[in-house]
Amino acid sequence: MALISLEHVTKEYDGKPVVNDLSLKVGQGELFVLVGTSGSGKTTTLKMINRLVDPTSGVIEFADKPLTSYKMRDLRWDLGYVLQQIALFPTMTVAQNIAVIPEMKGWSRQKIRAATDELLTTVDLPPAEYRNRMPSELSGGQQQRIGILRALASRPKVVLMDEPFSALDPISRTQLQDML
Ligand SMILES: Nc1ncnc2c1ncn2[C@@H]1O[C@H](COP(=O)(O)OP(=O)(O)OP(=O)(O)O)[C@@H](O)[C@H]1O
Ligand SMILES: [Mg+2]
């Protein structure tokens, strides 16, 4: 069974295709990587899989059902997304940023707190020091790490990552890749 499948997907902006007749399948447990030059349509493809944008033509399926047959909320729960521009919520603390989807899922306070602290520890950000910081009080690489934790926190079925390790030094990058 394919977890994600694209069949002849095209996305046009102003009548010009930026993704042109793309077909692919990603199975459970598979690590699938899109490689391409700047502007070749990688981010657009991820956004279509997450329904931030809809294709002009073609069909995208998640777990063998068209994306359009899912409630938007259910998709957000099942697909974690690390954006190319990190975009943490600026008025929320680090812990609140990580907890967005777990909160929506109705996890208990204790469970959220335990999961948040464990994740922060994994990426070498001591919870006592970082839990209550605001995104503006973090370095770019630290913000990037929180963006990744936010996508992983609720253990989604799929994690879409858009150049998630680009702002990181080689040591943090290796650490996060191992964690993933
Ligand atoms: N909302 C939009 N309206 C018009 N054109 C767009 C829009 N979004 C993206 N594009 C264009 O679509 C093309 C693909 O963009 P996309 O962001 O998918 O590229 P990318 O492969 O992720 O590039 P990069 O490696 O630089 O991140 C680009 O030429 C871009 O200018
Ligand atoms: Mg991109």
Image (tube, rainbow, N blue to C red):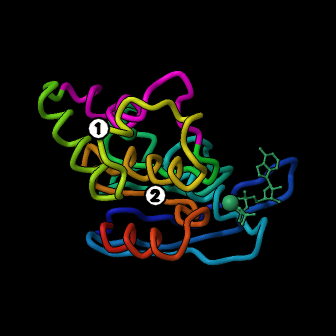
Q: In the depicted view, which residue is nearer to us: 39 or 101?
A: 101
> Which residue in the structure is indicated by mark 1?
128
Q: Residue at x 71, y 67 (%)?
A: 20
Q: Residue at x 13, y 34 (%)?
A: 111
Residues under numbered marks 2 and 1 in contact, where contact means CB atoms less than 8 Å apart: no
- Is 112 located above or below residue 29 in the figure? above
The picture places residue 119, in percent across and down from the top left corner, at 27, 50
Q: In the depicted view, which residue is nearer to us: 161 or 140?
A: 140
The picture places residue 40, in percent across and down from the top left corner, at 75, 69
Amino acid tagged 2: Leu
Q: Residue furthest top?
A: 91
How many neighbours does mark 1 have within 10 angstroms: few (below 14), some (14-19), or many (20 or more)?
few
Q: Which residues are magenta?
A: 87-106
Q: CA distance from mark 2 to mark 1?
A: 29 Å
Q: Quadrant of residue 64?
A: bottom left
> Which residue in the structure is indicated by mark 2?
160
The picture places residue 97, in percent across and down from the top left corner, at 41, 33
